Amino acid sequence: MYVNLSDRFMKLSEISKVGIVGAGTMGQGIAISCALANFETILFDVNRDALTAGLNQIQKSLEQSVNKGKLSQQDCDRALTRISLVENISALHANLIIEAVVENLKVKQTLFAQLEKVNDGKAILATNTSSIPVTQIAASLQNPSQCIGLHFFNPAHLMKLVEVISGSQTNPELILLMKDFAKALGKTPVEVKDSPGFIVNRVARHFYVESLKVLEDKVTSFDAIDNLMRSAGFRMGPFELMDLIGMDVNYAVTTSVYEGFDKAHKFKPSDIQYQKIKEGNLGKKSGKGFYDYSKK
Ligand SMILES: NC(=O)c1ccc[n+]([C@@H]2O[C@H](COP(=O)([O-])OP(=O)(O)OC[C@H]3O[C@@H](n4cnc5c(N)ncnc54)[C@H](O)[C@@H]3O)[C@@H](O)[C@H]2O)c1
């Protein structure tokens, strides 16, 4: 059952099915959050292996929470029954669809245009982009008023903050609805103006870019920088954080913010990071980044 947003605006209680596109790092965490909050959750990925691997990782993450005493076995089992997989985008029917695919404007635009068609224009389309202005992503849609940014943080099932970003044509009622949705997931929504990198990623760029510059200048080693930053009060150092985020994702975000701010030198992406991507050292997800995870 879909509600045509142009007739009457959807209520939170009418969001029963949430579609998640992209079964990688973020899609997994968002799917866990939705399933734990009782939403029927449908996961899709263009890569079938990634879809299966994503579900396996979801199971592992939920089991970890049970082992740590943070989740009951019953809630874990129930959450897993709420998650289903679809292997074809044409089967992705939902009231709200959250995309967590690669950080690339063209890919996100094409995907949203497809999803709008598949859902007869009746689904809310939310992007988990880290940096690309929502207005640009929504530009591919017949009805950009149903597009919004829902920026979760990594690991998405544990981190509370969600930046809620409205594009220039986003329906103001949708902003309210998505703030309620984020609260229903147990998150803390913060409304943010549409601009490259929004707030957190724009500010945090300097944490990564400057640390990479320190490394480039051979001031010290990457693990020494991490140790120092942790000693200074940060929960994680920049290099372990880049490994957690994914080198490719972090580099794409820096590039997008750099271009969004007319190639301002302060956001210039680092060659060290580019080299890591070329070597396939993407961080935790590939087993090696700045650190080696193969034996852990
Ligand atoms: N990793 C982070 O810390 C983080 C934090 C916040 C936001 N984000 C944003 O979330 C998005 C996803 O990041 P991630 O780290 O989960 O990436 P990821 O590389 O772990 O996963 C992306 C997944 O999307 C799939 N995919 C690619 N194109 C697709 C398409 N057209 N249709 C369906 N599936 C497709 C890939 O097969 C892959 O499984 C990006 O926009 C990123 O900027 C990432």
Image: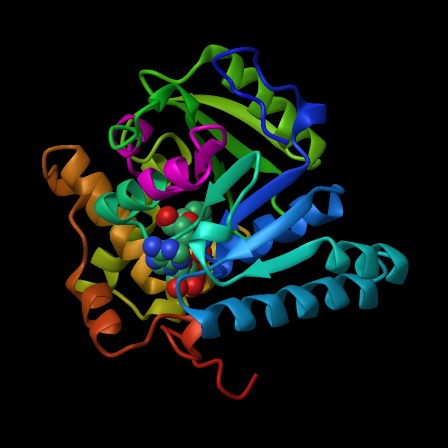
Residue 70 seen by the camera: no
In this orientation, which residue lies closer to the viewer: 39 or 240?
39
Figure check: 156 above or below 23? above
- Picture residue at 32% right of the left edge, 76% below the top: 281
Q: Where's residue 191, x and y in %?
A: 49, 21
- Picture residue at 19% right of the left edge, 65% below the top: 274
The magenta-colored residue range is: 113-137
Q: How many marks?
A: 0
Q: Where's residue 129, x and y in %?
A: 38, 41
In this orientation, which residue lies closer to the viewer: 128 or 113?
113
Q: Is residue 208 magenta?
A: no
Q: Is residue 133 magenta?
A: yes
Quadrant in the picture for residue 225? bottom left
- Picture residue at 33% right of the left edge, 16% below the top: 169
Q: Where's residue 88, x and y in %?
A: 45, 59
Q: Quadrant of ligand 1?
A: bottom left
Q: Where's residue 71, x and y in %?
A: 83, 56
In this orientation, which residue lies closer to the viewer: 277 or 231?
277
Figure check: 129 above or below 179? below
Figure check: 156 above or below 202? below
Determine whether, in the image, residue 295 is placed left or right of residue 210. Answer: right
- Picture residue at 46% right of the left edge, 37% below the top: 119
Q: Residue furthest bottom?
A: 295
